[in-house]
Image: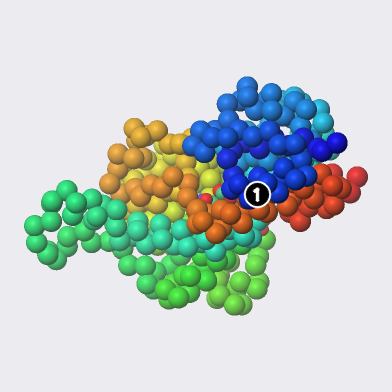
Amino acid sequence: MKPKVAVTRKIPESILERLREKCEVKLWPEEDEPVPRNVLEEMVRDADGLYCLLTETVDDALLAAAPKLKVVSNMAVGYNNIDVEAASRRRIMVTNTPGVLTETTADLTFALLLATARRLVEASDFLRQGRWKTWSPMLLTGMDVYGATLGIIGMGRIGEAVARRAKGFGMRILYCNRTRREEAERTLGAEYATLDELLEQSDFVVILTPLTPETRGLIGERELGRMKRTAVLINAARGGIVDEDALYRALRDGDIWAAGLDVFEEEPVKPDHPLLTLPNVVALPHIGSASVRTRTRMAEMAADNLLDALSGRLPAHLVNREVFER
Ligand code: NAP
Ligand code: GLV
């Protein structure tokens, strides 16, 4: 008998076919609409595997509704949508897709930094709205990126890839992690800093930590108050890391200069969200890893993880290794 697998969104057909060869697949076939919770609960009831996206909340209640579940394969590197502790307690493997999206997400992070610094979206809207009357000395002036100081909070795979790009822009690179990255210090000239030192000295602060209980609300009123009034905040990690009310006030009152956001506390962010009323915010719909090649590779990697787990092999990207070893 083939194992049963629930797949929570339309994924590339070739990958679905691979899954169907080995598994009985129950698919939520929509592309633009997440699976409703009650449907998901029904889908996992007799499932051995769950192939899901970061839009699905995989909490203890969902796991409790899936007594046969052996693996949750997330098509994302971040897995804050999954209660890993609850999964481990139930001896369910959790897998993710690290590495394959690193360079693509670093490209987007740096693009967002440049767009925010140089007001690209605002300038493009200005032109399209017919407001461009003449070249003028201080029209739509922004902040220089070349030679500025970049502070990376979360110098992991993507943080380091952003630092490599920054090196080409002649930037001084500060970083803050719980552990030092001596290799990055040697090869990129990155300097280890405390969070406060980084906030006080950086012209651009880029957030690239996972969302965890420790990083939730990491950047709030106090931290924004430590930043330069000319500084730019870029969040390409997860929305909950930044206190959005505090960020709104800081941007409105000119305590910091601008923000570039690929992620929000609640996604999709409501079009009338206060942050979206500000001209000094560049906002994107969580597209960090969104290139055709990378999304395809992520989908493949999530399928490999799932199939390995179901056939008793160690999945390449197992988050809770203790479950396999027990
Ligand atoms: P990673 O290699 O694990 O890097 C995360 C870094 O954050 C690590 O260096 C870690 O170092 C640091 N960190 C963790 N907790 C910290 C804390 N409390 N304070 C300071 N630093 C902390 O992960 P990655 O592959 O670079 O991905 C990072 C995150 O980016 C993902 O978790 C995901 O949420 C997000 N992401 C977003 C997109 C998007 O579309 N916008 C795409 C991909 C990923 P220490 O453990 O030493 O502290
Ligand atoms: C995207 O946000 C991811 O975590 O892969």
Q: Which residue is drawn at 40% across and 43% down?
A: 247
Element at label 1: helix
Locate residue 62: give its quadrant. Answer: top right
Residue 188 lies, in percent from the top left, at: 56, 75
Outermost residue toward the right in this view:
326
Does any portion of residue 235 appear in the rendered image?
yes
Q: Residue at x 75, y 45 (%)?
A: 21
Find residue 84 and report its image quarter.
top right
Q: In which quarter of the image is the N terminus?
A: top right
Rendered location of residue 299, percent (x, y) = 63, 50
Residue occupying image coordinates x 23% and y 50%: 125
Nearest the camera: 260 or 94?
Answer: 94
Rendered residue at 43%/36% (across/down): 269
User: 82 or 265, which lies in front?
Assistant: 82
Q: Quadrant of residue 192?
A: bottom right
Q: In this view, does 57 lie above or below 152?
A: above
Q: Does the residue labelled 1 lie within 8 Å of ligand 2?
A: no
Q: Is residue 131 left or right of residue 116?
A: left
Q: Where is residue 34 in the image (x, y as percent from the top left)?
A: 54, 33
**Callout 1 amino acid:** Ile
Q: Where is residue 287 in the image (x, y as percent from the top left)?
A: 47, 50
For the residue pair 200 and 5, the one nearer the viewer reads as 5
Picture quadrant of ligand 1: bottom right
- In this orientation, does residue 196 appear? no
**Pointer 1 residue:** 15
Q: Residue furthest left?
A: 133
**Labels in figure, total:** 1
Residue in front for this viewpoint, 294 or 89: 294
Quadrant holding the C terminus: top right
